[in-house]
Amino acid sequence: MARSKQIKLDQTPAAISQPKVKVPEFLAVDFFSGAGGTTRGLLDAGGYVIAGVDKDHGCERTYTDNNGNQTLDRKPPHYLCRDIFPCSAAHPEGQQQKLMKELDLLITRYKRLAPGRPLMFAICAPCQPFTTLARKELSEKRVERRRQDKNLLSEALKFVRRFRPDVVLSENVSGISDPRFGGIWEAFRKGLRASGYAVGSDVVCASKFGVPQFRKRSILVAVNRKKSKGEAALKGTLSIPIAGGSGKERTVASTISHLPKIEAGELHATIPNHRARTLSDTNLKRIASAKPGVSNSYLSNTPYGDLSLPCHRRVKKKLKTACFTDVYTRMSGDRPSPTITTKCHSISNGRFGHYDTTQNRGISLREAAALQSFRDDYVFYPEDGVCTVARMIGNAVPPRLAQSFAEFSMTLLDKRAFPSITIG
C-alpha cells in the first residue's frame, strides 16, 4: 500500500502567532474522507478539520488542494493515509496504533489552539458492502475486502471511545440498517449509547437539503449526553430533521445549465473536469433518440431502427416485463438528478444522459460533481483520470448534506458547556 509522507506532528502552526486569528465553530476529524465531500461540508459549516483519514493515497491531492481551512492556521487538514484496522497476522497492513498516536498529538495540539470548541468525528464508512450491487458475484479478493469493510464502523467506534468527541456524525446508504447486513448500523448505535452518547438516526433524501439529487441516505448523529441539551440530555434520544433550510428542491437545469456545451469525448479547455466520456456510434444514436425523463422503451423504435440491447430483449421475453429501463436515458432538466454513482459518466449504467437534447452525451465529470453539490472550482485529480475521478465523485458525501447536519449537530449542544459556540 502506498505510504503518505510523514507528518511533522511536533511543529506549531506558524500562522497562529498572527493577530486576529479567526476561531472555528468546532474542530473535526473526517474518517474515510476520500476526496473530501464531508470535509468540504464541515468547513462550510464553520469548522476546522484537523485531519482526513483514508487509506487511498490517490485521493490525497484532491483532498488537500480543495479543502484549506479558513480559521486558525488556514492550512489544509492533514491527510493521514492509514489503515484503521489493528495490525495482526491476518491483517499485517493495519495501522490503528500508529493512527491513534498521530491523532492524539494533533487533537491535543488543536484543542490547545482553540480551547472550548467542540470536537466532531465524521465517520462515513464506504457504502459498497451495503448496496444491492454488492451482491453481484465478486472475486475472492473483493469478497474479503467487503467483509473487512463491514467492520469499519466497529473499528471507528474504538476511536470514539479513545478520544470522546462531543459529536459523531455518520452517513451511509439507506439500506445499511437492513438485517441482512448483520445489524452493523444498530450495533454502531448501541455502541455509541453505551459510551454515553444520545443517538438519533433516520433515512433522508439529499434533495431536501439543497443537493440537486435524489439520494436517500441513512444519517446518524450522536452527542455526548453530558454536554447536550433538551431531549438528548433527558432521554438520550435525538430526532433527525428530514429537510433543511427551505427544503426546496434544486433542479438539474438550474445546477448545470451554466456550463458550456461539449461533445462526447471532449475535455473543455479551461473548466477543470468538464469532460464527457467517449461514445460509440451506436450509443450516440441511442442518446440522440432519447427524450429527457422517459424510459428507454424508445430504443425499439428510433430513426435509426431497433437499437434495444439483445440481452434486454431476452430478459423482457423471459420475465414478461421490461428491466433496466433507466440505461441509455436522459435526466429531466426540471427535477433533481438520480443518484450520482461511481458510474455517473456512463449512459449504460443509469439515467446519466444530459438533459439538453442538443448535447448527445452523458453528463460530464464537472456536471456530476455539481449535482453532488461540489463547487465548480473543486478540482478532482488526476484530471485525465475519467474513471478514477468518477469513482471519487460517486463515493463522496454531498458537501451540502454534510454541512446541514454539522450545523444541526451544533444546535444540540449545551452552550454552557461550550461558552464560545456561536452557531445554533
Image (tube, rainbow, N blue to C red):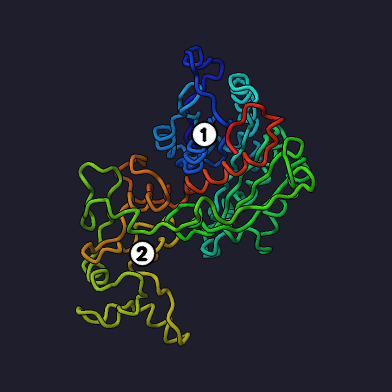
- Real-space CA distance between mark 2 and mark 1, rounded to the nearest whole angstrom: 32 Å
Q: SS for tag 1? A: loop
Horizontal side of residue 343 vs 187, given as left or right: left
- Looking at the rendered structure, the kind of residue marked 2 is Asp
Q: Earlier in the sequence, mark 2 or mark 1?
A: 1
At 27% from the left and 51% from the top, the residue drawn is 258
Q: Give the label on residue 402, or none.
A: none
The residue where tag 1 is placed is: 46
Name the quarter where the C terminus is drawn.
top right
Circle 2: element type: loop
How many badges with numbers are in the image?
2
Amino acid tagged 1: Gly
* Looking at the image, residue 244 lies above or below residue 69: below
- 317 to 324, vertically: above or below: below
Left or right of 223? Residue 363 is left
Q: Residues within 10 Å of mark 2 (few under 14, many from 20)?
A: some
Mark 1 neighbour density, 10 Å: few (under 14) some (14–19) many (20 or more): many
Mark 2–mark 1 contact, CB under 8 Å? no
Q: Find residue 113 and report its image quarter.
A: top right
Instruction: Name the spot of residue 246 as percent of width and height, x first.
Output: 49, 53
Instruction: Name the residue located 64 percent from the left edge and 31 percent from the top edge.
Output: 118
Residue where numbered disc 2 is placed: 334
Figure check: 261 above or below 312: above
Residue occupying image coordinates x 39% and y 64%:
335
The image position of residue 244, as x and y in percent, is 53, 51
> Looking at the picture, how far across and down is residue 61, in whole percent?
40, 34
In the image, residue 357 lies at what x, y percent? Answer: 24, 66
Q: Is residue 160 above or below residue 201?
A: above
Out of 371 and 301, give the one closest to the viewer.
Answer: 371
For the question of whether residue 214 can be seen, the reply is: yes
Residue 105 appears in the figure? no
